[in-house]
């Protein structure tokens, strides 16, 4: 009998040992989650360093913008001054052209006077001609005088004619010279003005070219600033996600520890029940053997006692209930898979269906973040711990959000309704699974088709 009780106790001990071994994965899961938490903290540190670097680059870009802006202002000032000088030259050219027009009128009047003198001289010459072309013989005029008085009159008349002709010729010559000199002066002045204007226009072209280059540089700097702002927004968003991820992982650790504690309590309760059952069975067996030994058919009873069946092995404690797989988060056909699309990496799958289509949690987990993103639209991030491995799932472009950051959810929990928010081209659900934490480069993205049932 003692041997049987010992065998029963040994069986109980082996059963308890099996229960202890069954509880170990929960401890391992918590340890793996601790590693994931450390990994998240390292990514937070790296993200913060990159954010500080981008802030420094942004400060440099803004400083360069200030320098370029000052240069553009100086160029604008020089362009304005040049424009003013060109305006002055254009006015001078206009005035000179007006002066030239006036001079043309004067030249026309002079030419008219010259033409009159030419006619007078020609008439004088004709009157001095005799018989169709000979010149006047001054000696014959003088010798033809009838008396001394007539001679004097003739001499005076010839002198008057000569003086008049000389005066006409001198005036003719002076007028021609004046016209030519004035015309040359005005043309020289106009040429000088045109040259100055051309130089100013060349200067303005050069300034405009410099200004265009500076404007192009400023536009490039503004684009760079915009890119840095967008990158910093991504980094800030990543920082917020990582901070939320840290909280979610801590919550998952707490959940795992709670599950382990519950499993330990169930194991102890099962062990206690098994022990009590074994002790009861051992007592019953002892009582049975004692009763058998006092009966008259001791030999047959002894034989029967020696062939009795051993106590049954206690059943192990049930494992804590947990969904260890992912389900498809929404109904509808998959319209796009993971991979390159439109020149970028599509980090998940798209599920599309019309109407009010609910979106559900693909597995048990914690709401890492629930918010409206410019790109994802209404989006929910969940953190999951499955068999010691951390996963992150993303549910994007939803019409609405039905859960809050930090909330614990079970597989199948309603998260929102399929929608068309953010950068979306029609109602659908964009669904991602990341093995580990989510990051902006989405380097941890895996193909959801390999995980969902």
Image: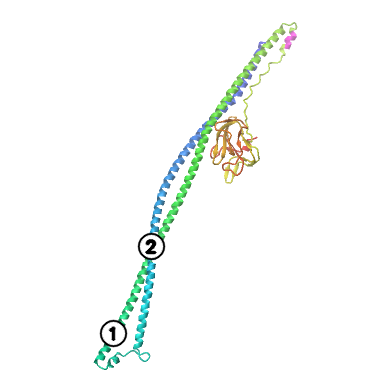
Q: Secondary structure at mark 2?
A: helix
**Image quadrant where residue 139 sits:** bottom left
Q: Position of residue 297 (x, y in %)?
A: 75, 7
Front-lying residue, 274 or 134: 134
Quarter in which the N terminus is drawn = top right
Q: Main secondary structure of the magenta part?
A: helix
Q: Residue at x 35, y 83 (%)?
A: 120
Label 2 CA crowd tier, 10 Å (few <14, some 14–19, many 20+): some
Which residue is found at the position 39% from the left and 70% from the top?
A: 101
Which mark, residue 160?
1
Residue 368 in sight here: yes
CA gap between label 1 and label 2 equals 52 Å
Residue 373: x %, y % from top left? 54, 39
Q: Residue at x 44, y 53 (%)?
A: 213
Q: Which residues fall within the magenta stretch?
A: 299-304
Q: Is residue 113 above or below residue 155?
A: above
Element carrying mark 1: helix
Q: Which residue is mark 2?
A: 89
Q: Quadrant of residue 18?
A: top right
Q: Residues within 10 Å of mark 1 (few under 14, many from 20)?
A: few
Q: Is residue 264 above or below residue 422?
A: above
User: Residue 381 location, x and y as percent?
Assistant: 57, 35
Relative side of 90 to 8, left or right: left
Asked whether 407 falls inside the magenta stretch, the response is no
Q: Quadrant of the C terminus?
A: top right
Which of the two residues, 77 or 159, is positioned nearer the viewer here?
Answer: 159
């Amino acid at each position: 009998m003692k041997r049987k009780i010992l065998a029963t106790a040994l069986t109980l001990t082996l059963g308890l040992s099996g229960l202890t071994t069954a509880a170990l994965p929960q401890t391992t899961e918590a340890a793996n989650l601790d590693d994931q938490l450390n990994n998240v903290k390292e990514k937070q540190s790296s993200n913060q360093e990159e954010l500080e670097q981008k802030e420094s680059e942004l400060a440099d870009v803004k400083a360069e913008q200030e320098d370029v802006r000052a240069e553009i202002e100086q160029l604008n000032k020089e362009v304005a001054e040049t424009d003013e000088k060109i305006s002055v030259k254009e006015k001078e050219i206009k005035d000179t052209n007006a002066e030239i027009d006036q001079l043309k009128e004067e030249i026309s009047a002079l030419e008219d006077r010259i033409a009159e003198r030419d006619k007078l001289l020609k008439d004088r010459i004709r009157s001095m001609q005799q018989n169709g072309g000979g010149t006047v013989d001054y000696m014959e005029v003088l010798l033809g005088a009838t008396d001394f008085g007539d001679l004097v009159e003739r001499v005076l008349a010839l002198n008057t004619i000569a003086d008049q002709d000389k005066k006409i010729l001198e005036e003719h010559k002076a007028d021609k010279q004046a016209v030519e000199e004035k015309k040359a002066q005005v043309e020289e002045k106009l040429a000088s003005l045109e040259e100055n204007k051309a130089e100013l226009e060349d200067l303005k072209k050069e300034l405009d070219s410099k200004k265009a280059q500076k404007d192009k540089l400023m536009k490039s700097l503004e684009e760079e600033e915009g890119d840095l702002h967008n990158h910093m927004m991504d980094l800030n968003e990543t920082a917020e996600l990582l901070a939320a991820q840290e909280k979610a992982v801590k919550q998952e650790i707490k959940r795992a520890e709670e599950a382990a504690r519950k499993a330990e309590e169930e194991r102890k309760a099962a062990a206690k029940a098994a022990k009590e059952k074994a002790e009861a069975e051992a007592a019953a067996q002892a009582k049975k053997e004692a009763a058998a030994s006092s009966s008259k058919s001791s030999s047959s009873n002894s034989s029967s006692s020696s062939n009795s069946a051993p106590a049954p092995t206690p059943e192990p404690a049930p494992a804590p209930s947990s969904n260890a797989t992912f389900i498809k988060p929404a109904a509808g056909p998959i319209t796009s898979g993971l991979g390159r699309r439109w020149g970028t990496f599509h980090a998940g799958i798209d599920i599309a269906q019309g109407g009010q289509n609910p979106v559900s949690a693909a597995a048990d987990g914690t709401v890492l973040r629930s918010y409206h993103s410019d790109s994802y639209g209404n989006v929910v991030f969940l953190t999951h711990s499955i068999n010691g491995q951390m996963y992150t799932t993303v549910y994007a472009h939803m019409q609405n959000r039905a859960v809050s950051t930090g909330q614990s959810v079970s597989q199948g929990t309603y998260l929102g309704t399929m929608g068309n928010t953010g950068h979306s081209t029609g109602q659908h659900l964009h669904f991602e699974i990341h093995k580990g934490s989510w990051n902006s480069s989405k380097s941890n993205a895996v193909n959801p088709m390999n995980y969902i049932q």
